[in-house]
Image (cartoon, helix red, strand yellow):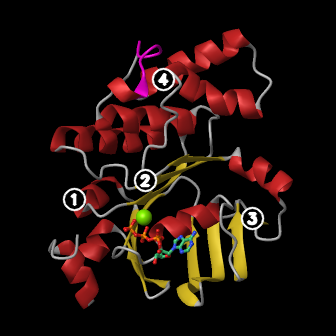
Amino acid sequence: MSAPAIEFRQVYKSFNHIPILAGMDFTIEPGETVTIIGGSGIGKSVTLKLIVGLLKPEAGQILIEGEDIVPLAEDQLIRIRKKIGMVFQSSALFDSLSVAENIAYPLREHTAMSEQEIRKRITETLYLVGLEGAEDKEPADLSGGMRKRVALARAIALTPRIILYDEPTTGLDPTNTEKINELIVDMDRKLAVTSVVVTHDMRSAFKISNRIGLLDKGRIVIAGTPEEIQRADLPLVRQFVNGTMA
Ligand SMILES: Nc1ncnc2c1ncn2[C@@H]1O[C@H](COP(=O)(O)OP(=O)(O)OP(=O)(O)O)[C@@H](O)[C@H]1O
Ligand SMILES: [Mg+2]
């Protein structure tokens, strides 16, 4: 049996003595698409940043494919980050760079690929996100949905084994929301990745997830398939499912 893709073991993280994660345990298996839901400021983005080692916990273990990344120094974390693509809450594109150069950025940073290989990879990733031919566009000229897709193209450029999405559909209209949801499902099918999606959007969560986990008071208080979550009678879950907490 292969190691879990991601495993949190008794993870504690606080800021200025205010606990955010308080003994979080959570395991995500290879190939799963897991959505994390929870109130604003509860620690969802912090959880994603811990997975890529942008933040360090005070205690606990965070295992990526069986390896605890908590003790790793910055130069070792680079090796881990190559396995993980992250689509940030703000698309975080470089506005001074073209779409092509945004996607090329991690390739130039982390690989010895030739210009020709880089160009080919840019074409492939833009095709995967449905933006073929957008190489020379400037991020400023793109709609919110297109920016998200370029951010996704950049995240998959290094062919990661894990993709993290922080609120990929927030602020998008229903058509673009649908497109992004289809892309997330598509990435799983085409690239066989493990996906962790943070979202406020329960409709999206039900549509794309193998499992949904609810983060509250520093822990995943319930995790289950969309059907299980739909049936759960925990009051907080009901608030999310009924849309009064989204
Ligand atoms: N680098 C930081 N320094 C200090 N406090 C931080 C830092 N990052 C996050 N926090 C605090 O930790 C808490 C959790 O933040 P986080 O960004 O994970 O929330 P969230 O669940 O993603 O919320 P939202 O749904 O609004 O994006 C917040 O109170 C936030 O202010
Ligand atoms: Mg957040």
Q: Which residue is mark 1?
A: 203
Q: Nearer the viewer, mark 4 or mark 1?
A: 4
Q: Quadrant of residue 226?
A: bottom left
The answer to which of marks 2 and 3 sits earlier in the sequence is: 3
Q: Residue at x 71, y 67 (%)?
A: 63
* Mark 3: amino acid: Gly
**Residue 228's image quarter?**
bottom left
Residue plotted at (39% across, 39% down): 148
Q: Secondary structure at mark 3?
A: loop
- The amino acid sitting under disc 1 is Arg
Label 2 vs 4, first from the N-terminus: 2
Q: Are marks 4 and 1 in contact (CB under 8 Å)?
A: no
Residue at mark 2: C-beta within 8 A of ligand 2? yes
Using the numbered discs, state the Cα–Cα distance from disc 2 to disc 1 in whole angstroms. Answer: 18 Å
Write the residue at 38% across / 34% down. 147
**Which residue bears the numbered disc 3?**
66
- The image shows residue 133 at horizontal and vertical percentages of 41, 12
Of the numbered discs 1 and 3, the one sitting upstream in the chain is: 3
